Amino acid sequence: MEQDIIAMARALGRAIQNDDRYIAHALAKQANDEDEQLQALINGFNMKRMELQMEIGKPDKDDERVQMLNNVIKDSYQRIMKNPKMIAYNAAKNGMDELMNQVNTIITMSANGVDPDEIDLDAVSCTGDCGTCGGCH
């Protein structure tokens, strides 16, 4: 029986990878990874964040420099998030996250004794924080 469940989990994994939401997410991620301009923006953003963390950690931190770095980081973040490929990626990621939340909800609620065929995914809104879920307790 244990091997049957593992085989079914592998089959579910293959089904997920054939789902349009998975494919859209993978393609959007690849497009982002291959976009040199977007990657340069992301790398610059990460470098400024590290710079800010180092400045904040100094015993004699320069408040003006901290504010300037904060402004640069905010501007970089806005530019990244306005990039059309990043917008497409975020939309695809939201679709993939929704799929995974639905799958996890069915598995979790089933493991807690709920009939899998009776789980109404429209009525269940999983936040990912099991403490907020009345269905698992």
Image: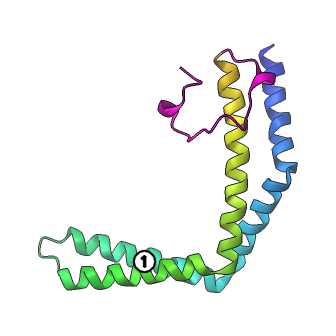
Asked if the magenta segment contains residue 134, the reply would be: yes
Residue 33 seen in this snapshot:
no
Q: Which residues are magenta?
A: 113-137
Task: Tell me what residue is drawn at x 72 percent, y 55 percent.
Answer: 95
**Residue 112 at what x, y percent from top left?**
63, 18
Q: Which residue is mark 1?
A: 47
Task: Tell me what residue is drawn at x 78 percent, y 26 percent.
Answer: 6
Which residue occupies the foreground of this view, 81 or 44?
Answer: 81
Crowding near the residue tagged with mark 1, few <14, some 14–19, many ≥20 C-alpha atoms within 10 Å: few
Query: Left or right: 131 with respect to 62?
Result: right
Q: Amino acid at mark 1?
A: Met
| Image quarter of residue 56 | bottom left
Q: Quadrant of the N terminus?
A: top right
Which residue occupies the foreground of this view, 14 or 107?
Answer: 107
**Residue farthest to the left, as pictured:** 60
**Residue 130 at what x, y percent from top left?**
52, 32
**Residue 68 at what x, y percent from top left?**
30, 85
Asked if the magenta segment contains residue 133, the reply would be: yes
